[in-house]
Amino acid sequence: MSSPSPSNLACLKAQADFCASMADLEFKTWRNLHDALEDSAAPFANMAIRQNVRMLGDCTCVPIRELLQRVLKAQRDLAKSARALKEWVRKEKRAHRAFEKMLALL
């Protein structure tokens, strides 16, 4: 049995790292969904995106590269949605405080 080529090993490592990071990301994202509204979630999301960008650069296997590209797009879309949701919550809280002040004046 011949040993795998360095590019095959890189793909296997990228695939293993990808699976581990996705499992970790999924667990933390769904377990702590409410944290998406807090600043503490942003560094984790950015770290996961940077890690997948590095893996994408190291991988020469086309199917895994395509999968990583789709995951990166999904991660970026999720980060954008989380920011939009966080901003909406801020606006709603401000509106609620303004409403409470108005009621207090009555």
Image (cartoon, helix red, strand yellow):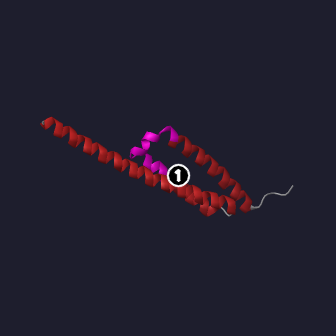
Residue on which disc 1 sits: 48
> What residue lies at 54% left-to-right and 58% top-to-bottom?
73
The residue furthest front is: 106
| Magenta stretch: includes residue 99 | no
| Circle 1 residues within 10 Å: few <14, some 14–19, many ≥20 | some
Which of the two residues, 98 or 54, is positioned nearer the viewer here? Answer: 98
Identify the amino acid type marked 1. Ala
Left or right: residue 82 compared with residue 105: right
Quarter of the image where one finds residue 5? bottom right
Left or right: residue 81 compared with residue 8: left
Which of the two residues, 39 or 6, is positioned nearer the viewer here? Answer: 39
Q: Give the range drawn in magenta.
A: 30-46
Is residue 61 in view? no
- Is most of the magenta stretch helix, strand or loop? helix
- Which quarter shows the N terminus? bottom right
> What residue lies at 52% left-to-right and 54% top-to-bottom?
75
The residue furthest right is: 1
> What residue lies at 67% left-to-right and 53% top-to-bottom?
15
Quarter of the image where one finds residue 100? top left
**Residue 9, placed above or below residue 88:** below
> What residue lies at 26% left-to-right and 41% top-to-bottom?
96
Is residue 77 in view? yes
Left or right: residue 49 compared with residue 86: right
x and y percent of residue 37 in the render? 40, 44
x and y percent of residue 55 in the render? 60, 58
x and y percent of residue 47 in the render? 50, 52
x and y percent of residue 61 in the render? 69, 62
Q: So how many labels did they put on this image?
A: 1
- Which quarter shows the C terminus? top left
